[in-house]
Image (cartoon, helix red, strand yellow):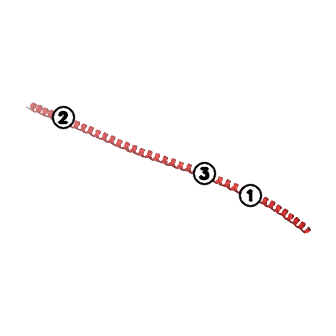
Amino acid sequence: AGEVKLKEAEEAWAANLKAEKAAGGAKLKEAKEAGKAKLKDTKEGAAAALKAEKEAGGARLTDEKAAGVAQKAEKEKLEGQVASLGRELTGVKAAGVAQKAEKDKLEGQVVSLGRELMEEKAVGLAQKAKLEARVGEVGAEKEKL
């Protein structure tokens, strides 16, 4: 009777062990699947976050590139304005030089005309003196007559 009880206890214990082993295997399998699912979710979340970060970085880079292009265009525009002002200044300077040359030319003409006038005045005075002398001579001849 003791052996039968021992055998029944061993069988019950073996059955219990088998049930616990099956339950533990099921829990292990469930935990393993839950871990895989969590890993997959984490991996997908990290990939999505990385993609979003990459897109944001790309957009930021595009914005910075556009800002750089705009700055370059503004720089070129200002350089063009500087060149244009330089040409304008050169034109104004050339006009000033031309005006000075014209002024010098006119002053030279005034001086030349002044000399001519003085020469003509001297000739006129000489002629006047000759005429006055002639008038004196004619007057003296008239007196003689």
Alpha carbons under labels 2 and 3: distance apart = 101 Å
Left or right: residue 1 versus residue 48 is: left
Q: Amino acid at mark 1?
A: Leu
Going from the N terminus, do you reach mark 2 or mark 1 first? Answer: 2
Q: Secondary structure at mark 2?
A: helix
Q: Locate the C terminus by quadrant.
A: bottom right
In the rendered structure, the answer to whether residue 54 lies left or right of residue 127 reads left
The answer for how far apart the CA atoms under marks 3 and 1 are is 32 Å
Front-lying residue, 100 or 113: 113
Q: Residue at x 78, y 59 (%)?
A: 120
Residue position marked by numbered label 2 in the rendering: 22
Q: Residues within 10 Å of mark 3 (few under 14, many from 20)?
A: few
Quarter assignment of residue 53: top left
Check disc 1 and report the residue beneath it.
Answer: 113
Tell me the amino acid under the disc marked 3: Gly
Query: As drawn, which residue projects farthest toward the bottom?
Result: 143
